[in-house]
Amino acid sequence: MSLFGLGSRNQKTFRPKKNAPSGSKGAKLQKHIDATLGSGNLREAVRLPPGEDINEWLAVNTVDFFNQVNILYGTLTEFCTANNCPTMSAGPKYEYRWADGVTIKKPIEVSAPKLEDEAIFPQKLGAPFPPNFRDVVKTIFKRLFRVYAHIYHSHFQKIVSLKEEAHLNTCFKHFVLFTWEFRLIDKGELAPLSDLVDSILQL
């Protein structure tokens, strides 16, 4: 079972990707993302395009960031096991626990590979957004950050040996700039990677 509950069917070589929102609006926004990312200016790439709906922009980018983290984590699944990572953590000072607020109300300790709940990730983006959409997006981004923190603290040497550090660093920089632009993660939550985050934001 993978971190994001994508099943076990040929897990090592087959990783289904979530699609961008259907319809011309989502496709148009995805083209904008692709064009601005290619420019090399990540600060510009994260900004809401003029005249676009903020929820559509958050939705398209949420799927994109999920896909990025899923691909990065996918390269580590054989190393990030319940044996190697008995606790989802970001170094010795930070441990992440799991609670969904519905079936698990009191946070419990879990191994890194078991931290999953695909139900929180929007499946059909493009439909009208619920009133709590921004709160859902914030929860998703907080959980994605925790995966990044775990990768950096527990698996960075493996990332280096796989020659993936440039990709990881670029994805994380893009992620940080986006979350900062839209205030999606509280500053305190960023503490496990505060030095790296501050260097990206140049605070």
Image: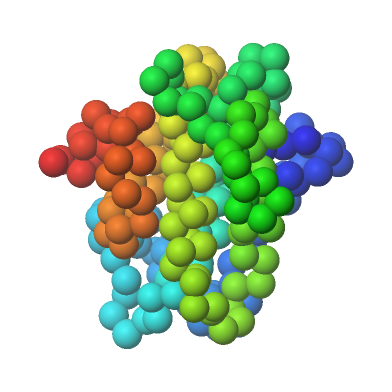
Q: In this orientation, which residue lies closer to the viewer: 118 or 98?
A: 98
Q: Position of residue 105 (x, y in %)?
A: 62, 47
**Residue 22: which quarter of the image?**
bottom right
For residue 151, side relative to residue 183 (left or right): right
State whether residue 176 is above or below residue 61. Answer: above
**Residue 152: which quarter of the image?**
top left
Which residue ends up furthest to the left in the rendered image? Answer: 203
Picture colour scheme: rainbow
- Image quadrant where one finds the C terminus: top left
State whether residue 53 is above or below residue 30. Answer: below
Q: Position of residue 172 (x, y in %)?
A: 39, 40
- Image quadrant where one finds the N terminus: top right
**Residue located at (61% from left, 59% from top):** 121
Q: In this orientation, which residue lies closer to the viewer: 29 or 34?
A: 29
For residue 15, side relative to residue 132 (left or right): right
Q: Position of residue 48 (x, y in %)?
A: 32, 71
**Residue 168: which quarter of the image?**
top left
Q: In this orientation, which residue lies closer to the viewer: 51 or 88?
A: 88
State whether residue 131 is above or below residue 134. Answer: below
Visible residue check, residue 26: yes
Which residue ends up furthest to the front in the rendered image? Answer: 106
**Residue located at (36% from left, 51% from top):** 185
Visible residue check, residue 13: no
Q: Position of residue 82 (x, y in %)?
A: 70, 21
For residue 9, side relative to residue 184 (left or right): right
Total tally of numbered discs in the picture: 0
